[in-house]
Image: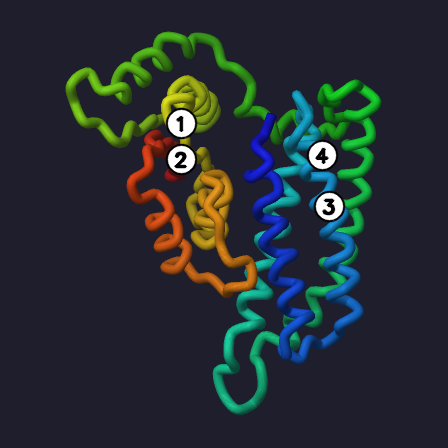
Amino acid sequence: MEPVSVATGAMGSVLGKLGALLADDHEVPNVDDVEALKAELQAVHASLKAISQAEDPGEQGRRWMKEAREFSYDVEDAIDEFMLPPRDGSGHTASDVFSEKFSTWLRDAAARRRTGQEISDSISRAGGGGIEAEDPRDCSFYKEMREPVGLDGPAAELVKMLNGGGKKLEVVSIVGCGGLGKTTLARRVYDTLGEQFEYRAFVSVSRRPRVVALLREIRSQLGCEHDQTFTEDEQSLADSISNFLQDKRYSTPVQIIGNLQF
């Protein structure tokens, strides 16, 4: 089961900022569109919570939650940019772009809301169990989540290394070509060691990472409380996480390197 804080934290944050956008004097191009988007995302948020609480949301449910979070990050990034002070006297530089994106966001949010409701209803009919995805793209999407053969030995060795053995080891790197099961191995080690830590996070980083979205995901998994109406940058997010983790026992120890991705 995916923790509720992970599945709903990102969407809760963007809902808070949409509310602030409506409440404050930001000269929103189209208030009706903002309110409509907020209503759609509230429904998506409800489905996120329902699906994340399922014993097994299934592959389709997990994929939908991941895509919904990424969508919320895109919307939140645009809101943050729009709420920044104008750069010159000619008006807000992000206003036109912000307005243009709303029609796309509304269509996207509506589609996600419908899909989320269908998945949630299917899980309810199945008695809380997950449903398997019928989309043929699922095979490639979950390719690396399959269980490769022969991971028991490497996983046990990594667990032993990270557990100490008298040495203070903070990071372990898993290096190799794509398709060898690096992420699956890292996930197994993470799950094995995770119970030792009250605070932990498991994130994927691309070659060109969106650092703000990455830090938000870490913060969400840690359950770090924050002001959802505050416009954030990389430094403020990093400071928020650092301050939250002071005097706490936490773990983010495994690095995966392959095809120039880590």
The kind of secondary structure element at disc 2 is: loop
Of callouts 2 and 1, the N-terminal one: 1
For image coordinates 81% across by 27% down, the residue present is 122
Q: CA distance from mark 1 to mark 3?
A: 37 Å
Q: Amino acid at mark 3?
A: Val
Q: Amino acid at mark 1?
A: Cys
Total of numbered circles in the picture?
4
Mark number displayed over residue 44: 3
**To which residue does mark 2 refer?**
259
Count residues near mark 4 (Cα–Cα under 10 Å), then give few for <14, some for 14-19, many for 20+.
many
Residue in view at x 51 percent, y 79 percent: 85
Q: Which mark is residue 177?
A: 1
**Comes first in the chain, label 4 or label 1:** 4
Q: Nearer the viewer, mark 2 or mark 4?
A: 4
Query: How far apart are labels 4 and 1 at the CA level?
Result: 37 Å
Disc 4: which residue = 50
Mark 2 is surrounded, within 10 Å at the Cα level, by few (under 14), some (14 to 19) or many (20 or more) other residues, namely few
The CA distance from mark 3 to mark 2 is 35 Å
